[in-house]
Amino acid sequence: MRVDVAAGPLVSVVIPMYQAGAWIEETLTTVSAQTYKNIETVVVDDGSTDRGADVVAEYAASGSTPVRLVRTVNRGVSVARNTGVLASCGEYVALLDADDLWHPSKLEYQVAHLTGSGAPMCVCGYEMFDDRTGRPIGVVRFRNGSRALRGWLALEGNGLLLPSTALIRRTALEDMRGFDPEFSVSADLEFALRMEEVGPLDAVPETLVRYRVHPAQMHRQLSELSADMSRLYDQVFTGGRYQSIERRCRANLAAHVGFSELIRGHFRLGTLHLARSA
């Protein structure tokens, strides 16, 4: 199924940005290149100190795609996303991280899919690439978003990369009241778990996003990852529900952090985490 790319419902592209001046112009260019044209773009500068906001302002002044820049103090990515959603008005909301890239047909495929399925959200496959060389690292595809969510919760395989693959119905976002600012590294996973309560998470198998891998990414902050995921597990498994799954999830988290610390040469800390995975 294809939609009339000259019309169709308005899609709001929400891009939270923090210290992304080196990448944001290339990211915006992939939004402008979309074959689906009924788009508005909102970039929320989350208190950056680099030239990112200036780059966006210059792009907005010269580009053919409407781009709105919202400047805020630094309050974290969840608040920045929520701010962007509130500043937009599209029937659909497409999330995009300021350092990732879209295939030209990304929105066209997903709008067509959600128009036919009625699902609250749709994700797609993505290719990881090295920021320094541009070379592909690997490809992640999904045929069932809800099934993939279980593996993401247990840190088994790759996540759904919601910040750049998701197209979401605004009505579902409003019902959920957006992203929870109490979470940082695991905010996307917490959001996806709540979204699944609204309805099944659909996926298109096409690889429509390029995910830039570089050292500054939030998920590489191990201490924050450990604390954030532990808090999420406390919330998900409250009251002793699903004890066997909980044990597996917590063991996988300890193993992931432990091996990562060992790779960084932190042998004592790595060993402590690995002991908890047994």
Image: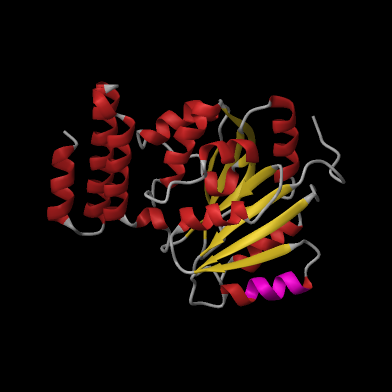
Image vertical order of residue 196 relative to residue 176, above or below: above
In-front residue for pair 90/158: 90
In-front residue for pair 14/153: 14
Image vertical order of residue 169 relative to residue 88, above or below: above
Does residue 129 show up?
no
Q: Is residue 168 magenta?
A: no
Q: Where is residue 224 drawn, in percent x and y?
A: 30, 54
Q: Which residues are magenta?
A: 55-61
Residue 81, quarter of picture: bottom right
Does residue 54 show up?
yes
Q: Look at the magenta stretch and give its main secondary structure.
A: helix
Residue 205, quarter of picture: top right
> Which coloring applies here?
secondary structure
Q: Residue at x 29, y 33 (%)?
A: 249
Q: Residue at x 14, y 48 (%)?
A: 271
Q: Is residue 59 magenta?
A: yes
Quarter of the figure that contains the C terminus: top left
Q: Residue at x 76, y 42 (%)?
A: 108
Image vertical order of residue 6 relative to residue 237, above or below: below
Q: Where is residue 68 drawn, in percent x and y?
A: 68, 64
Quarter of the figure that contains the N terminus: top right
